[in-house]
Image: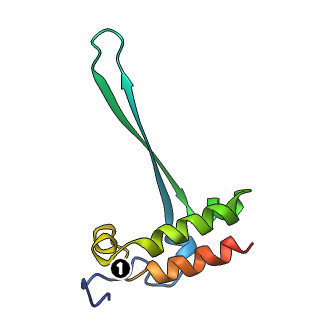
Amino acid sequence: IDRATNRPSRFPDGDIDAHAFIRVERQTLRKLPVSRDILFTIRIHLDPLAVLARHPDRAKLAASFAAQLEALDLAQLDYKGLTSDRDRLVDRLGVLALS
């Protein structure tokens, strides 16, 4: 259990590869031609960590994801539910970054 938030780990059995997902959002703005209104869209990509491990650019991507996780402050980690698991995720991404 994370003492700062009293939230349990998302990966209680220690198998991050089996439970962790990478979530990436692509946000776009488009002006509609007739009404000239602005349309905001979000496309969410949600893939298991195993997909990243097979990606040809896994080293670069894993290093980038690890750096982003390390840059989150406590409030951001709590909001994302990652307070108790960040270090383990960063370690796993570090291994992928070296492969």
Element class at badge 1: loop
80 up-or-down from 14: above or below: above
27 up-or-down from 23: above or below: above
Q: Which residue does the image show at 51% across and 82% down from the upper left?
A: 88
Where does the N terminus fall, quadrant-wise? bottom left
66 up-or-down from 21: above or below: below
| Residue 40 x/y as whole percent | 33, 33
Residue on which disc 1 sits: 83
Q: Quadrant of residue 28?
A: top left
Q: Quadrant of residue 35?
A: top left
73 up-or-down from 49: above or below: below
| Residue 32 x/y as whole percent | 34, 17
| Residue 75 x/y as whole percent | 27, 74
Where does the C terminus fall, quadrant-wise? bottom right
Q: Quadrant of residue 30?
A: top left
| Residue 19 placement, left or right of 78 | right
Q: Which residue does the image show at 30% across and 25% down from the upper left?
A: 38
Q: Which residue does the image show at 31% across and 87% down from the upper left?
A: 2
Question: In front here: 44 or 36?
Answer: 36
Q: Label 1 sits on what residue type?
A: Thr
